[in-house]
Image (cartoon, grey):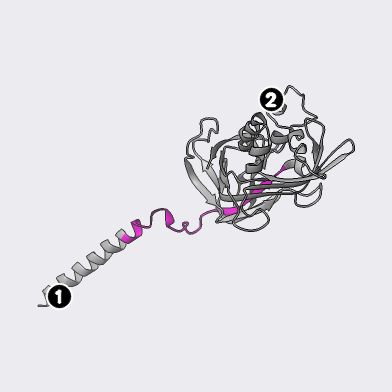
Amino acid sequence: MFRKNIITLVFIIILLAVTGCSNSNSQGESKEQPAGKKVGTLQFIANGEDFIREGFISKDGWALTFDHVYVNLSEITAYQAEPPYDAHNGGEITAKEKVALAGSLTVDLAEGDEDAPPVLAGESQEAPIGHYNAISWKMTRAMDGPAKGYSLVIVGQAVKDDKTIDFVLKYETEYKYTGGDYVGDERKGVLQEGGTADIEMTFHFDHIFGDMETPADDELNTGALGFKPFADLANDGKFEVDMTTLKEKLSAEDYKMLVDVLPSLGHVGEGHCHVEVQ
């Protein structure tokens, strides 16, 4: 009888051990970071560049300044990509580590004065150390706030000769951007233990309006709409339009140019992104 009880007890212990292993394996990707894993703070930056903070002159001579440039961002994720991501080929990122920001948020790229730093969209204080050499994000329609119903809202003023136009441009189209390593004067995304690094989502608004300081035959300007087609929509020195109105009011050629150029807003520094219209 005693031996039978011992055998039963051993069987129960083995069964519990097997069950415990099975439950542990089923957690998969949701398991906690190993104790003692080296981490730091990874910051996610949204940058409209000096074009937005300081203003600029469009390819057709309009001096543009911006009160607000609201961009609604979601599914922002940084990656330690291996192999490095090639935006020209597109596809999914293969990564050994990734860090994501939860939810969505609306940032104002024109926030602050001319000397203001780019906008901090969020951060993770428990990011695994390493080189974050890829990033993806979506521009999606905001559910509330100043950009409600739109992925991008541009509020500003345009001046040329004796004309001044107050304008609001609202875009509802949604995009997913996937980019590789930051291209610029400094290296970004290299996170050391206990340190802070940043990775950037860059937005090039000269792609829409062109840039007077760039040669007229440069690809930037030949592909940009300029501001005159928008200025022609003004009534009593102002206009507020969305894509539906623009489709009705712009010429077919100008509207197509705008639709074609909008996806190119998102960059990683000067690095191009793979873009998907959602």
**223 within the magenta span:** no
| Mark closest to the chain's N terminus, 1 or 2 | 1
Q: Residue 29 at x, y = what percent?
A: 42, 53
Which amino acid does the dot numbered 1 rest on?
Asn
User: Which residue is outermost to the right?
Assistant: 162
- Taking the view exactly as shown, the residue that stands out farthest to the top is 217
In the structure shown, which secondary structural element does the residue marked by tag 1 occupy?
Answer: helix
What percent of the width, then of the height, locates residue 158? 81, 41
Q: Which residue is mark 2?
A: 219
Q: Which residues are magenta?
A: 23-48
Q: Which image quarter: residue 185? A: top right
Q: Taking the image as drawn, is residue 4 in sight?
A: yes
Closer to the camera, 27 or 70? 70
Residue linked to disc 1? 5
Return the x and y of residue 110 as percentages of the image width and height: 75, 48
Q: Is residue 136 above or below residue 121?
A: above
The amino acid type of the residue labelled 2 equals Glu
Q: Nearer the viewer, residue 71 or 158?
A: 158
